[in-house]
Amino acid sequence: FTQSIGTKACRIEVIPHPENALPRALVVERALSRVGETGYNLFSKNCEHVVHWCVTGEELSHQVDRFTKDPIGLAISILEEQAKAGAPVNVHEIFRTFLPPALWKPINMVQEQQNKLRDAATHAKEKWREKWRGERGRS
């Protein structure tokens, strides 16, 4: 289901505990033991890994498994989910998440250069307009 959190719509998926789930008190104890932990990694230590570990004792992520089998399909489904939820679709964030840093950094550098060029062109256009208006005013 989808729930609004602040100004964002978030898709929340409730998954039934597997048959090999640990007792609830132990699941809570294990979850509390990870509070404040750092070292998030999309592929080896994401929220699904942690939840699955708390519940079953093994770190597993079906999302990562799906990504490694069909990365384009997963990216498309994320875009579709964002659109259905009415959330703004942030393609750059999706690329940053799925592309390795060696590919993302050059793309980001090109984008920064494009932004600088756009800003310089806007500034030059404003200066030209001011000059043109000044010359028209003197005529």
Image (cartoon, helix red, strand yellow):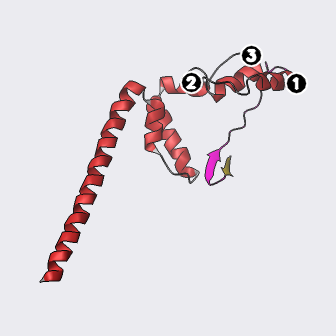
Q: Is residue 128 left or right of residue 91?
A: left
In this picture, is 129 found above or below 24?
below
Question: Can residue 73 be seen from the camera position used here?
Answer: no
Q: Is residue 49 left or right of residue 74?
A: right
The residue labelled by disc 3 is 57
Q: Earlier in the sequence, mark 2 or mark 3?
A: 2
The residue labelled by disc 2 is 41
**Measured Cα–Cα span from mark 3 to mark 1:** 14 Å
Part of the protein shown in magenta: 6-23
Task: Decide which of 123, 30 is in the foreground and name it.
Answer: 123
Marks 2, 3: nearer the viewer: 2
The kind of residue on which mark 3 rests is Gly
Q: Is residue 64 magenta?
A: no
Task: Decide which of 123, 26 is in the foreground and name it.
Answer: 123
Residue at position x 58%, y 20% in the image: 44
Residue 65 placement: quadrant: top right
Q: Which residue sits furthest left?
A: 139
The residue labelled by disc 1 is 25
Q: Earlier in the sequence, mark 3 or mark 1?
A: 1
Q: Position of residue 29 (x, y in %)?
A: 83, 23
Q: Earlier in the sequence, mark 1 or mark 2?
A: 1
Q: Say what secondary structure mark 3 lies in.
A: loop
Marks 1, 2: nearer the viewer: 2
Q: Say what secondary structure mark 2 lies in.
A: loop
Q: Say what secondary structure mark 1 lies in.
A: helix
